[in-house]
Image (cartoon, helix red, strand yellow):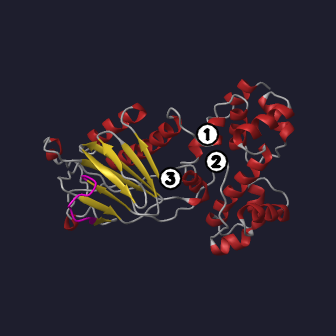
Amino acid sequence: MSSSNSASNLGGVDAFGDLFRGMRAQGSLFGSSTLSPPWALHFVDGPPLTLCTVLGGAGWIVPEHRPPEQLRAGETVIVRGPAPFTFVDEVGTRAEPVACGEFCATPEQGGTRHRLGWNDTSCDSGDGATTLIVGAYPVRGEISRRLLDALPVVLRVASGGGAVPVLDHLAATVAADTPGQQVVLDRLLDWLLVCAVREYFDRPGGEPPAWYAAQRDPVVGDALRLLHAEPAAPWTVAALADRTGVSRSTLAKRFADLVGEPPLTYLTRWRMTLAADLLAEREAATVAEIARIVGYTDAFAFSAAFKRIRGVSPSEFRRTGTVVPERPTGPPLRPPGAVLPVIPAPSPVVRVRS
């Protein structure tokens, strides 16, 4: 089978897209509110990822122990938690910081919760006010945690590019009183997050993760898509090479060179990440059942692999929910139908008037 033919049968499975499957905005709080200088908002919740976008005006993101990042109209910054950060009108502002957590968007805290059809027209007054949208993202399961390992503490994306249509839709939708508005706002925030991360990886002179760049290779990219599409298949390097239309030695070398580890090592890490989420979510399932789902007919072999990769046995992980941290070298993957556990975290919010 040729490489092109195998790719056409993979049903759009995407290693990059799988990183976002456990990260979704839900019940976001939005508003076109303004911040008039001087102002300082101190974000104290410390979620795994916080996305900040300025629709109008400008400001500075000041992370803990990191240099400030200026944020102008149309620009986006993603801050990786759990450390808090501050959004200010200027570095060294005289404003007293206002602590912003999940309650910052309530009227008694100087803000306003988004209401259908509500819009603060003063945001277009041209008086130096700044309109800021902030979304706090939870992390659902071990799969999405891999995204955090691929990102710096502060990721900044300039205006323009693929995010422009998203920002245009956000500005229009946030003030529209239409059926399904909340769902649209949530998905726009998701769209913006994906665009920002992708543009960061694709920037000139950038250093994206090895697995991200490897997806563009006609051979290794097909191999990654096959492993995503069929995680429980009895893969061998020879079988994978046959499906991608190259020799075993060619696939093994190109995969290791581009991804940083052999194909079956990558597969094992992926299966263990998937297994960790299934162990957390399917409490009634036995270890043997989880083993079969991720491609192991032998529960003992699965348990040994899990402990080698994750640092604890499957039973101990299920009991404590903890593992010895590892630095993964490739993105995790999920077979069709796997449902990821949800770890509660603050809902995305928009920070409002000080």
Report if the CB atoms under discs 1 and 2 are less than 8 Å apart.
Answer: yes
**In the rendered image of this protein, does residue 219 appear above or below residue 101?**
above
In this figure, which residue is indicated by the disc labeled 3?
Answer: 23
Q: Is residue 193 magenta?
A: no
Amino acid type indicated by mark 3 = Met
Front position in the image: 78 or 282: 78
- Choose mark 3 or mark 2, whichever is in front: 2
**Mark drawn on residue 331:** 2
Amino acid type indicated by mark 2 = Pro
- Please state if 22 lies on the left or on the right of 288 as rendered: left
The answer to whether residue 179 shows anywhere in this view is no
Magenta residues, start to end: 89-98
For marks 1 and 2, give the CA distance.
8 Å
**Element under label 1?**
helix
**Mark drawn on residue 96:** none
In this figure, which residue is indicated by the disc labeled 1?
Answer: 212
